[in-house]
Image (spheres, coloured by chain):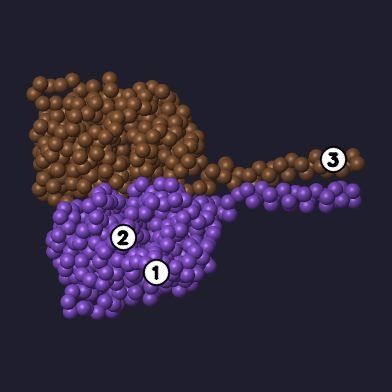
Chain colours: A purple, B brown
Amino acid sequence: MMRQLLTLFVILPVLLLWQNSLAEGCPADNNTVRGTGDLGIVIERASGSVQIIETSHNTSLGRVEGLGDLSHASAVYSRDERYAYVFGRDGGLSKIDILNKKLVKRILQSGNSIGGAISQDGRLVAVSNYTPGGVKIFDADSLELVANIPATYGNHLQRSKVIGLVDAPGRKFVFSLWDAGEIWVADLSSPGNPTITKFKDIGKNPYDGLITPDGRYYIAGLFGEDGMALLDLWHLDAGVKRILDHYGKGEQKLPVFKMPHLEGWAIAGNLAFVPAVGRHEVLVIDMLDWSEAGRIKVHGQPVFVMARPDGRHVWVNFAVPDNDTLQVIDSQSLQIIKTLTPGKGVLHMEFEPRGEQVWASVRDEDRLAVFDTETFEQLNTLEAQKPSGIFFTSRAHRTGL
Amino acid sequence: MMRQLLTLFVILPVLLLWQNSLAEGCPADNNTVRGTGDLGIVIERASGSVQIIETSHNTSLGRVEGLGDLSHASAVYSRDERYAYVFGRDGGLSKIDILNKKLVKRILQSGNSIGGAISQDGRLVAVSNYTPGGVKIFDADSLELVANIPATYGNHLQRSKVIGLVDAPGRKFVFSLWDAGEIWVADLSSPGNPTITKFKDIGKNPYDGLITPDGRYYIAGLFGEDGMALLDLWHLDAGVKRILDHYGKGEQKLPVFKMPHLEGWAIAGNLAFVPAVGRHEVLVIDMLDWSEAGRIKVHGQPVFVMARPDGRHVWVNFAVPDNDTLQVIDSQSLQIIKTLTPGKGVLHMEFEPRGEQVWASVRDEDRLAVFDTETFEQLNTLEAQKPSGIFFTSRAHRTGL
């Protein structure tokens, strides 16, 4: 009997070791075996964390912390929709495994940065930096530095802040130089050795840029003067054109409480919907000739102007003091068909991939609100810590997001 | 000593059972813990199987068998991009878990069917049936029948074959009745009790239909006469219009080796590219007024005419005897810029979500060919058993695919 017990004491530890080794082969929990097409992250700026959510049942799956300063943070996704790359304001670039809810790697790649992009093929992640001004390109798997593009200009002693960085078809990145008033197109076909095409004198202080969903037109908004700079990436030789001379603050320099975002440009058919600068207006642009096709009076200074994926409605949020409100514009009648007041601090919206629901961040109420885009009924509200940007994995399949 | 051995014999089975129970808690292999945004399936029609592939490294992940008659089969995806719904010719509807490479459920829902769709919210799967003619709607989770829409017409004793079934925003499905010459819009807002809007006398023998990527326009091609039937889903009251009176076989009734597919309609800016019927031509349509904007001479009778996601190039494959060839059209110059001959039996193409590569089925060589869409270089070739349709998970996020 004693002997049998001894044998057990010998075998038991072996047995436990074996169990552990098997257990390590397993995912942390079975939620890790799931599709990733209905996942997303929400930036929680105050706490330097992101919340991972899913849109099939509108629930929270967890939180990843330790991401540094996430004010004005944005994110892109790996081509398999498993990893989120989060661009922090402090120069931090974080790679998050949203299946295992783990921070995979975090690097501090500059002193101050503003957004990034992922290449068409998903191999390269680019970050646009203020200090030192330029763009850094990283391997999407390892976050190893692949290329460094300092935004030098003039006598080449100065470096410009870089803004409006987007990906374009063919392993290209396009961005603007705030101080220099230039647009650069970087071709990363041979990653270590980028080819840069520079367009100078495009206008004073480009403050943000966007690329049309087809990846053809890059447009930079100007802070230093009215109008916008347009570059047709299919015809680089044609150079940069000025469009919308009346777009901007105008002569009597209006106070601007928050510069509008251009990423959220709404496109419905041939019409684009743009937040006016300073004015309580949404501008309508005919993309066939880039002329102004109308102005829609709205509740406040628009920040994001976003089309429902089918283009039939355009949703708008506003700068302080009107940031408790959302308005919905009919893209045909150009009328406001709905005004919602989700609560104080509506900072961002994200449509579900096919548009049946939309998520909104209500920062000052520490929650997310989900709306049915047909009935405008609020379907869900989820707790979140000072939420700002919302980013769904379906962005992985799109250009310029 | 003998006693210790005995003890081992007692403990060993327990130990093995334990190992198994732990192992079952794990995924079959660690490939099941992965993102699903870069996955896809390939229909292997002769063997009634689908091959599961991934587009990040262009490899095969496995095969699922026992899917019945897959001639002319197509597939849609669950909103989380984990499950594929495969529509077989024999009325079979199969739900496949592409992570675990398992057939989850298969039902025989009719005697003869042709394609299906999944609702905007991913809750409902619809199948269009020849015999008995109609549409059946199933719960996407359980494949339980939710609604049955028999395609009765005339004296209501006859039932029509149903074709051109697509999903539309707002839990709607749109389809056409081959024998009746009607287009029906089914609203599944209350799933058990669909509301049907019928449009009669839309033209003789609609043979296929498509919906524009924004989900606004439904277009049916007519086999019994020239022209196409156009329905603006934003203005159902305006009814069905006839467009492209010259679209079709014309007076001198050309032999048609294979009816072209409309699903693959290419849209670039305002231009749509359509396979001509019988003729060696691709038609160009100005979507602003639905008028013919040109005809492009091509190598044979076009079958699929598909735009690269950025709309800059349009890829075309052909009916026998020219089905060994692919041609690429520049959407601006309307010129053919490349002719490829991947091999005999090029049945289908699928672009990677952001368009940098395209996959082609080369049926008679039992392989898949992957091309770089910029250099046109063949990057990979993969073994496949008589491959036909190729469907990537990114379709989950799109309307009408």
Label 2: element kind: strand
Q: Position of residue B63 (x, y in %)?
A: 48, 33
Q: Chain of mark 2?
A: A
Question: Can you say whether B387 is above or below A21 in the image?
Answer: above
Q: Chain of mark 3?
A: B
Alpha carbon distance from label 2 to label 3: 80 Å
Packing grade of label 2 (10 A; few <14, some 14-19, many >=20) is: many
Residue at image location 29% in from the left, 61% down from the top = A200
Q: Position of residue A48 (x, y in %)?
A: 48, 70
Residue assigned mark 1: A158
Front residue of A279 and A361: A279
Question: Is B77 situated left or right of B168 in this image?
Answer: right
Q: Chain of mark 1?
A: A
Q: Three-letter amino acid code at disc 3? A: Leu
Name the disc covering residue B6, or none. Answer: 3
Closer to the observer: label 2 or label 3?
2
